[in-house]
Amino acid sequence: MTERIVNFSAGPGALPLPVLQEAQANLVSLPGVGASALEVSHRGAWFLGVIEEAEANLRALLDIPSSHRVLFIQGGATMQFSMVAMNLPRSGQRHADYVVSGTWGAKALAEAVRAGPTRLAWTDKDEGYTRVPGTEELLESIDADPAYVHVTTNETIQGVEYPDTPIVPDRIPLVADGSSDFLSRPIDIGRYAVLYAGAQKNAGPAGVTVAIVREDVLARVPDRVPTMLDYRTYADHESLYNTPPVFSIYVLMLVTRWLRDEIGGLEAMLEQNRAKAAMVYDLLDTLPDIYRGHADRDSRSLMNVTFRLPTEDLERRFVAEADAAGMVGLKGHRSVGGIRASIYNAMPLAGVERLTAFMRAFASAT
Ligand code: PMP
């Protein structure tokens, strides 16, 4: 087989090898179809079966209640920043409350401002985005009656994640950007009015975004939202109003099958993700003179481990030497620098072991 690197990319990120192999085996001719997934109608029986299974697998994995619809949308999580702001009404000039624990939350807020009254409810921007608010802190920071509260469950750039589903009072619609920890752990979907996630970290390739939307949100979409930005268009047409990203949804379906059959569900996935993340964080804690973790302990991301070395020169050497040793994607986001190891679902424990062995050797040689 072709040699594969250990892929620490933040997204698009590594996909499970069996998924790639199945997509490859069927690329030219799907069994029973005789054509590629890249060249069949989205209204044909094969794809209707695929999108149905994708939804059924997501429902089973996340235990999605019947009160919520599962929608497949293009435009990335970035377009969801706008769709959320346009679909959830801010009647009576009520504002939307945004909790900003990193770069993506800030971007979501910037889009919401364009659509209506918005308030920054909480941020630790001045402290460098190192944590999420605690439960009490979150409750105190939000308003009595906002149109909705928006959070980012995992900030991909800073490596800051909520340890559990954030809690707001039931009467307030909770909206989350769950892009970079989607399917990495069980979540309490019932608490969300909307949870959206770009697929390209844990769920599949780029090109499709999953939005899980509660029925009462659909019932209150304001008039005159453009058709393709209106959640109801997707809900009323089973995400087939126009041509969906067929291949991306196909691969997403294979990933959900892998999670179900090979991993055994999201509890099992979380256990693996905890074990992988603990290996890296333990190492950071053991060698604080050379590796300085970015996130506060209680907000450490299981998906994106971010840390600094004493100098930028050393960081450059770290990335270059890791690269030469077959470990790529470790350079931190260009806006923050440092090192980021993205260890999504598809990163095997052996990949993390290679990274920590490398980090130990690098520390001794420095
Ligand atoms: N939100 C989060 C948490 C992300 O990690 C990303 C992508 N890295 C985005 C939003 C933007 O996603 P997209 O590129 O799919 O628009």
Image: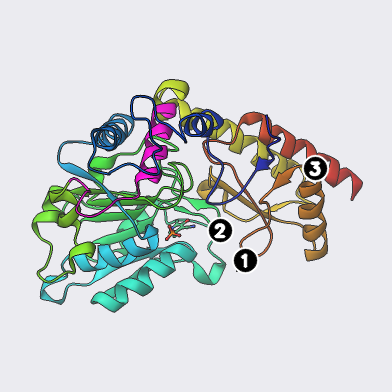
For the record, the magenta segment spans 238-259
Q: How many marks?
A: 3
Say if mark 1 contacts mark 3, CB within 8 Å: no
* Residue, disc 1: 336
* Residue, disc 2: 158
- Location of residue 135 with respect to 229 vertically, above or below: above
Nearest the camera: 22 or 151? Answer: 22
Cα separation, mark 1 vs mark 3, equals 24 Å
Quadrant in the rendering for residue 258: top left
What amino acid is at disc 1? Val
Q: Is residue 260 magenta?
A: no
Quadrant in the rendering for residue 65: top left
Q: Quadrant of ligand 1?
A: bottom left
Nearest the camera: 230 or 25? Answer: 25
Looking at the rendered structure, the secondary structure element under dot 2 is loop
Query: Where is residue 25 drawn, in percent x and y?
Result: 50, 29
* Residue, disc 3: 325
What amino acid is at disc 2? Gln
* Marked residue nearer the N-terminal end (1 or 2): 2
Residue 22 seen in the current view: yes
Q: Quadrant of the N terminus?
A: top right
The colour scheme is: rainbow
Cα separation, mark 3 vs mark 2, equals 25 Å
Cα separation, mark 1 vs mark 2, equals 8 Å
